[in-house]
Amino acid sequence: MMLKKSILLVLPLLVLAACSSSNRKEEAPPAEVAPPPAAVATPDNADAVASAGTVGELTARSVTLPADLADRRIIYSAFDSDSISADDQALIAAHARFMAGKSGVRIRLEGHTDQRGTREYNVGLGERRAQAVRRALGLQGVAESRLSTVSFGEEQPAVAGEDEAAYTRNRRVELVYTAE
Amino acid sequence: MIERFARAVRYGLATVLLLVMSSMARAQLQVDITSGVSAPVPIVISPFTDDAQPSAQVVGQDLSRSGRFVLQDRTRADYIVTGRAVPAGDGRVTLEFELVNLLTGQRLLAESVTAAPTAWRNAAHRIADRIYQRILGVRSAFATRVAYVAVDGVAPALRYRLIVADADGESPRTILESRLPIMSPAWSPDGESIAYVSFETRSAAIYVQTVRTAERRRVSARAGVNGAPAWSPDGKRLALTLSSAAGNLDVHVLELESSALTRVTEHPAIDTEPVWSSDGSAVYFTSDRAGGPQIYRAVPAAGAAVQRVSFSGSYNARPRVSPDGRQLAHVTREGNAYRIAILDLQSGAVRVLSQGTQDESPGFSPDGGTLIYAGRERGQGVLATVSTDGLIVQRLQATSGNVREPAWGPFRP
């Protein structure tokens, strides 16, 4: 029998109110985990309904870039593409020239996508973008050992927003200089 | 009606099916529902006597939010639940409850649940599970947990938290907090641990964290991508995604005890988002080897050919297997919208169950009756559930922040 019904269920379920606890517990990661404390793990049991404490910031020794490169460390990409424009090829060549004259400096290439599509697949697309810039720098003579890649997928947008303008700024590869 | 369509359609007509089903799903998600399901069961939950907590209220909320029950007064109800709280002597509290069929006078349940005073909500969820199963004959998952990622702040200065909450969203606990992204939480089959991806070192690594103690182990931190961890049904292995030096992503299997690594796919395309078949014999994953992303199946270490599983539409990704192993929930693209769909593995029929524009990260409840997924509204990430028959849709409203990547935990012993 066919029934016609009206159901509207909109439920305020996730109450993310700040929790506080007098016996706050924070356990350090086990000894195997060596990196600086950028993240804090918190036990979940009945006695410790606690939010975690302050999170440290990772800092790399800074590298002083010439003014014409300092503000031009981002290569933007078209939708679903890892190709590099002629202008960006010239920019990559300028970074390669700087690298050639500066020992003890490395570049980490951070690939990013816009927020559309599934998250781990986007990690793959961001990695493709970072690798395209890595290859371009390699073709300009930068040694493989001085370049590394990391893809953040859509997890670290440069700007908030859900329009084409925001997406265009979020599909990018950032060149992050680090001292060796 | 849905079944009639599914039976009538084979692979070649799957695209047509997708269009038909999506228009049906859209109608369902707006207020009107036309279907053959019976009316919700009218039930009355009397306040539990001597109870210091609103336990009966939580039982009633669980049942009514399921969409299968409606709370009524005694004159219109078919069933009544009564109960009382009794000190158990060791500091714990026993909730005794009875379920009676008001039409026949038959007593259907007379049971008790004992819990620490701090665990009264869990006790109430367990009572709701007993009532649901006794009346409807199928299991519910009120006494389970969900994990999800919450993000606060304004890009690019974001703060990421991994949160564990009861299945009704209450009692959220932050189990990890970071200034760098946290991704892809996955519950171990025993519900003790969560595997996830953290970028806390400015590179990707996979961790396994024991929920109760926060003790954690970094299980994969190779150069490049370490992503998409998925537990094998026996809890001994993780399927995961690693990248080569040239940046090519492939699915691998990691033995957790020995750290032995086995490659599952070897293809220049992006191969990622693995999930195990329910018997642990195969892995489903996303690959763009045919151009756009589609879902494939591979048998680890057997040298068997990879089979394509999804055929309708230009974008099908991030599969999750139903508890009975027969269906894949996944993300499908319709025009410019990303939506949640279920693929029947035997017939190939596809049903679209959500109507958002950026819906993603679907996962089955452990009873298989509900999907939880993430969507976006006004620039904020929100969570929602939809019953796998498409009839009951709920928004899980967060009072603050962006929420995403829900993962529904297993049944608890």
Image (cartoon, coloured by chain):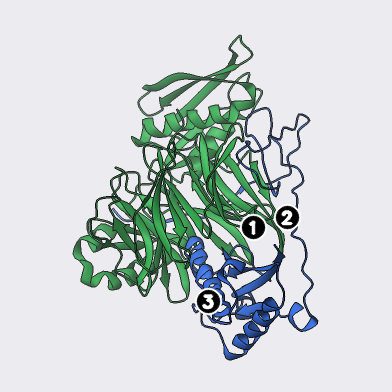
Chain colours: A blue, B green
Chain of the residue under the numbered disc 3 shown in the image: A
State how far apart marks 2 and 1 are (Cα): 8 Å
Total numbered circles: 3
- In which chain is the residue bearing label 2? A
Q: B252 left or right of A154?
A: left
Secondary structure type for disc 1:
loop
Which amino acid type corresponds to the residue marked 1 in the rendered image? Arg
Return the residue at label 3: A135
Tell me which amino acid carries mark 2.
Answer: Leu
On residue B70, the disc is none
Q: What residue is at 35 percent from the left and 37 percent from the top?
A: B138
Q: For residue B202, which numbered disc appears in the image?
A: 1
Respond whether the residues carrying marks 2 and 1 are from the same subunit: no
Residue B158 lies in what quarter of the image?
Answer: bottom right
Residue at (68% x, 76% y) in the render: A99
Which quadrant holds the N terminus of chain B? bottom left
Closest to the observer, B136 or B274: B274
Q: Please state the horizontal and vertical placement of residue B252, each as a whole percent of the image.
A: 39, 53
